[in-house]
Image (tube, grey):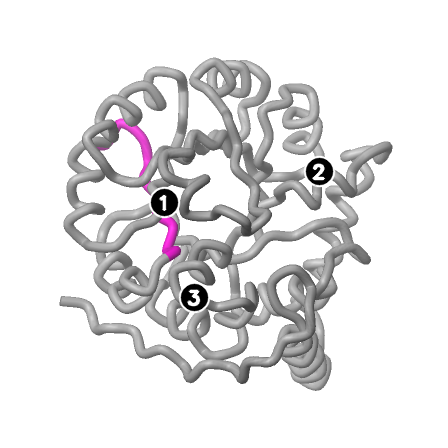
Amino acid sequence: MQLFLFTVDPRFGREVVAAGAAGIVVDWERRGKARRQAGEGTQINADTPADLARMRAATDGRLLCRVNAAGPWTGAEVDAAVALGADEVLLPMVRTPEQVDRMLDLVAGRCDLGILVETQDAVVRVADFAARPLSRIYVGLNDLRIDRGSDNLFLPLVDGTVDAVRAAVPGPFGVGGLTLPGGGAPVPGDLLAAELVRLGADFTFLRRSFTADMAGRDPAVEVPRLLASLDRLRRADPAEVVDDRARFVASVLATRAGGRVATAAPAPAVPVAASA
């Protein structure tokens, strides 16, 4: 499973990639995000083109740039990301195949394109997206929860939604995010890691919990330890997989946004539309 670190700290990014992470994500997405995520306690970055240039100079690992959701500004953002050395652009808040087709036209083969499935509209159209020449498809749980009006971040991993998306995406597919073994709250990170392995996730992100947990630690020690824990999970026997899944479901259903006790029952599995 490839690990991509959200950071604009050149030294930290270089050390984490040298220790085994696949690359870096520089995050330009902010248009409308504060309004959409108001009161949610989510991470909103303020990364800049200068940050992208610094991270390109800092590492030869794969460099991803998340731009803003599709709009009249998208062409200029793509041009800037390519000029500054991005290997791949990530388009968030996708809703229609037409948005993806326009983005592919804008990219025009100059770099790769990945998308984030973060809306219910995108969930039901994911087979259409997967038919496009995309470098990766990632399920963004925070915005999907907000779009659905849910209070449980991890419910799509329990109610069949992510399994259905995974079945429609041959790869590369990603979801969630990881921190160091033994970390993570309110759902234990080790159980989330087991769930990502069960789903056959090809990649995931290392975000603010990982960065916080890394304080005072050596990436050359901790990143290989995380990768080794994922390798152990891949070698788990079927009984362990079933047990980890049961414990993960129980943990998810016991919590909701903000770590409070959940009261809502899991939603039914959501069908994924067939490719056109």
| Residue occupied by mark 1 | 92
**Label 1 sits on what residue type?**
Pro
Q: Position of residue 222 (x, y in %)?
A: 79, 42
Kindly identify the residue that appears in the image at 66 percent across and 62 percent down: 193
Q: Position of residue 145 (x, y in %)?
A: 46, 62
**Along the line of sight, the residue nearer the viewer: 44 or 81:** 44
Could you give the CA–CA distance between mark 3 and mark 1, rounded to whole angstroms? 18 Å
Residue 233 lies left or right of residue 40; in this view the side is right
Badge number at residue 149: 3
> Which badge, 3 or 1, is on the more N-terminal residue?
1
Up the image or down, 197 lies above or below 53; here it is below
Q: Which residues are magenta?
A: 108-118
Up the image or down, 269 lies above or below 127; here it is below
> Which badge, 3 or 2, is on the more N-terminal residue?
3
| Residue occupied by mark 2 | 211
Image quarter in which the C terminus is found: bottom left
SS at badge 1: loop
